[in-house]
Image (spheres, grey):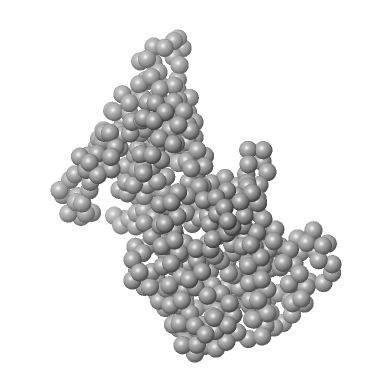
Amino acid sequence: MYAKRRQRLLNRLGDGMLILPTAPHAIRNGDVHYSFRAGSDLHYLTGFDEPNSLLVAWRTGAATHRSVLFVPPRDRAREIWDGPRAGVRGAVKQFGVDEAFAIEQLWEKLGELLGAHARVFHTLARDPAFDRRLLQVCAHNAAKQRRGNPPAHPVLEDPLPAIADLRLIKDADELARMAVAARITARGHCRAMQGAAPGMIEYEVQSLVETEFRNQGSARNGYDSIVASGPNACILHYVKNDRRIRRGELLLIDAGAEWEHYTADITRTFPVGGGFSEPQKAVYAAVLKAQKAAIRSVKEGATWDAPHKTCLRVLTRELIALGVLRGRPDSLLKKGACRTWFMHGTSHWLGMDVHDAGTYQEPDGKPLRLRAGMVLTVEPGLYFDRRDTSVPKELRGIGVRIEDDVVVEKRGPRVLTDGVPKEIREIEALCVGGG
Ligand code: GLY
Ligand code: MN
Ligand code: MN
């Protein structure tokens, strides 16, 4: 599977040498690191997950290529501290590359591997020290090749857009992993609905969600969980999660479990310690209506922003019904009047990364058209700040977002995340235990 992906990528890039390092292992303080997760691109092309590693690959024909991994070598002393490594032999045996070297040999070997390649596919500016050394190797190599005077340096090209193009269309293996991530994530959200109670601190509910993720076999989250009670729901990237939840408030949870490197991205908003109040219900119903209509607009051939356009249209009307906006829907829509309370986008690509790789534009700059195998979120919301005196009093402090993950299929949208309810009745039935 990984070799096939490499071949497809290299065929797309054409002749030349790909250099792809993994993510750096970031230091938190002293000798303590942040937990490491392999760069998604390197994992996508090799399945290799160790820090301090790098892939070099080039095509030798339409169906053949060579790949070389540079990896941390076996090291008994280090492995006592950090755990086992595949090492040079393991990299070849377990990961199917043609050759592997210790990462310490990178600079000595890279010149040899570069040989007469006229193009180098490497992304600049992620690691300036690496870039400088690479340019030195290229210059030295060009001089050695004596292809002319002055020597012909290789052309540098960014491989990321080509990798992103491949990652944008998920294959069957990826979709299967995403379905598991979605199922686990839905279970976590259900657990929160059942367990959240007035008086708990947001992070206690976070722990319920994430414990369920772990219990279901997910090793980590795809992103930091947002557990936002009452007015905190209006802070879009709220991750402090340290407020005590009061009876009758809404709780907005945006959390996703990772399964084998693929993440889900679900948001649900539900009442704690009873059913929805009338104003909460009205806002929730408005967002739900927009979200369902937006999901219906996910179709092959539609533009990727069709769900967003649908949300703008539906929410403008709903805001009029809520007494927030006044005027004619068409002119309010044109003015973007709803953006005060729905200020984010509706969709993004989803996959190994929560905001996954992939362009949003066709080559002519127009919005990208959806194709089977793309996966996107649909996540409208309405957020009425506590201090917003322009909205009816009873709406202030209410924030609602509903987010599902949707696969574009030939026969229509397939919602991966329907394992957690979003209908008002179903949510109230599940939440009753928290009262
Ligand atoms: N969880 C991040 C997002 O919904 O985009
Ligand atoms: Mn999202
Ligand atoms: Mn989300």
- In the image, residue 262 sits, relative to residue 183, either above or below, namely above
Q: Residue at x 53, y 46 (%)?
A: 358
* Residue that sits furthest to the left in the current view: 76
* Residue that sits furthest to the front in the current view: 411
Which of these two is toward me, 357 or 399?
Answer: 357
* Residue that sits furthest to the top in the current view: 149
The number of callouts visible is 0
Q: Residue at x 41, y 40 (%)?
A: 5
Q: Position of residue 19 (x, y in %)?
A: 39, 34
- In the image, residue 208 sits, relative to residue 44, either above or below, namely below
* Quarter of the N terminus within the rendering: top left
Q: Position of residue 304 (x, y in %)?
A: 62, 52
Q: Residue at x 63, y 67 (%)?
A: 292
- Res. 69 visible in picture: yes
Q: Position of residue 22 (x, y in %)?
A: 37, 44
Q: Residue at x 45, y 82 (%)?
A: 194
Which of these two is toward me, 301 or 398?
Answer: 301
Q: Position of residue 273 (x, y in %)?
A: 52, 88
Instruction: Place residue 191 in its image quadrant.
Output: bottom left
- In the image, residue 142 sits, relative to residue 365, either above or below, namely above
Instruction: Place residue 35 in its image quadrant.
Output: bottom left
Which of these two is toward me, 264 or 86?
Answer: 264
- In the image, residue 207 sits, relative to residue 146, either above or below, namely below
- Res. 227 visible in picture: no
